[in-house]
Image (cartoon, grey):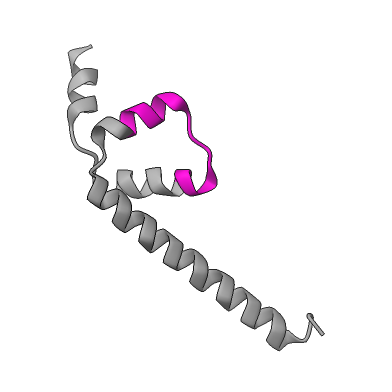
Amino acid sequence: MNELKDAARRPASLLQTMRAVAWSFLGIRHSSAFEQDVQRLNPVHVVVGGVAGAAVFVVAIVLLVRWVVSSGVAA
């Protein structure tokens, strides 16, 4: 039981932070997992991950639109 409490107090790794940000983008999060994230995540990592995720999303949408328009499907 103490091992679980120690794991909950340990700061989250960068991969865990990115997973939490990705799940937040999708809007799929359990309240218990959210509470654990609030205690463990570094706010700076969350902001950087959010900005990076938003940038990847925008670039993906732009590339998708360019591909659809250039293929002639949108004509």
- Describe residue 3's horizontal placement relative to residue 62 as left or right: left
Residue at the limit of the structure toward the right, as seen here: 75
Magenta stretch, main secondary structure, is: helix
Viewer-nearest residue: 16 or 56: 56
Number of labels in the image equals 0
With respect to residue 67, does 59 lie above or below?
Answer: above
Image quarter hosting the C terminus = bottom right
Image quarter for residue 55? Answer: bottom left
Please provide the residue range marked out in magenta: 23-37
Magenta stretch holds residue 64: no
**Residue at (26, 30) in percent of width and height:** 39
Q: Is 71 on the left-hand or right-hand side of 50?
A: right
User: How far across and down, in percent of the image, does residue 20 sit?
Assistant: 39, 43
What residue lies at 40% left-to-right and 47% top-to-bottom?
21
Left/right placement of residue 16 relative to residue 53 reads left
Viewer-side residue, 37 vs 16: 37
Q: Based on the displayed image, in which of its 4 quarters is residue 63 positioned?
A: bottom right
Q: Return the x and y of residue 49 as percentages of the image width and height.
A: 34, 55
From the viewer's perspective, is residue 10 above or below residue 25? above
Q: Give the residue at x 51% y 69%.
A: 58
* Magenta span contains residue 32: yes
Question: Does residue 33 appear left or right of residue 75 in this picture?
Answer: left
